Image (tube, grey):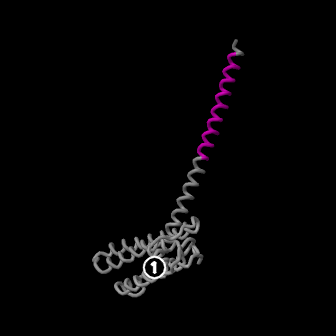
Amino acid sequence: MDPLTLAAITGGFAAVKTAVQGVRTALNTADDVGAIAGQIERLFKTHGEAKKRIVSASKNKNLPNNKWAKFVRFKLKDDGDDETSLANVAAAKLAQKQQEEDIRRLAIEINKRFGAGTWDEILEAQKVAIAEQKKRKEEEAQDKAYAVLKQKGLIQRIFIEFGKFIVVALFVAGMIAFIWYNKA
């Protein structure tokens, strides 16, 4: 991974860590599975936001300025002026490893509480839900495109019928004028 990507990981680290702690708390205290599910949803969202920060940081070239980065800069006596500095790279890599470890431990806790393979089932269910959502959005886009085409077809039919009406009206007006002229 390039240094910018690693630096971006540290930006979302705190939110993911908080979400992991929320799931752990819910596992230990909640009798309602809904509370646990809500915390897991929060974890997935914050993890997704952390991934978005990676993309954003690589575009914006933002430097990390969180606790990890400050701590490593202090220990390494590194000014951290650029994204390739040892302090920035180390802080980002450590934050990424810590995040992965927290999620792995959480998976073990969930598997202990609900049975082996539960975490994998949750991840698979999430993949299926994302695929279904993507398919639904594509279908909605196709439906909208079809509605637009149908609307254009309706407008074309209105113009055709209006044109027919004008032709018939001109024919009737011509016939009336012809009869009027012959009568006079």
Asked whether, in this view, residue 140 is left or right of residue 119, the answer is right
**Residue positioned 60% across, 76% down in the render:** 2
Image quadrant where one finds the N terminus: bottom right
Q: Examine the residues drawn in magenta and state their main secondary structure.
A: helix
Going by the image, does 131 lie left or right of 102? right
Q: Nearer the viewer, residue 118 or 153?
A: 118
Residue 165 shown in magenta: yes
Indicate the quadrant containing the C terminus: top left, top right, bottom left or bottom right.
top right
Q: Is residue 129 visible?
A: no
The magenta stretch spans which residues? Answer: 152-180
- In the orientation shown, which residue stands out farthest toward the top? 184
The residue sitting at 36% across, 71% down in the picture is 38
**Of the pair 67 and 133, the residue shown nearer to us:** 67
* Rendered residue at 68%/19% (across/down): 177
Instruction: From the top left corner, tell me how far across and down residue 46 is, in percent.
Output: 44, 70
Residue 120 sits in which quadrant? bottom left
On whether residue 30 falls in the magenta region, the answer is no
Inspect the image, locate mark 1, and give the three-letter code of the amino acid beneath it.
Gln
Q: Position of residue 8 (x, y in %)?
A: 52, 71
Report if residue 114 is visible in the image.
yes
Q: Give 125 or 65, whichever is nearer the viewer.
A: 65
Task: Identify the residue under disc 1.
Answer: 99
Q: Position of residue 40 (x, y in %)?
A: 39, 74
Q: Which residue is at the front of the view, 182 or 93? A: 93
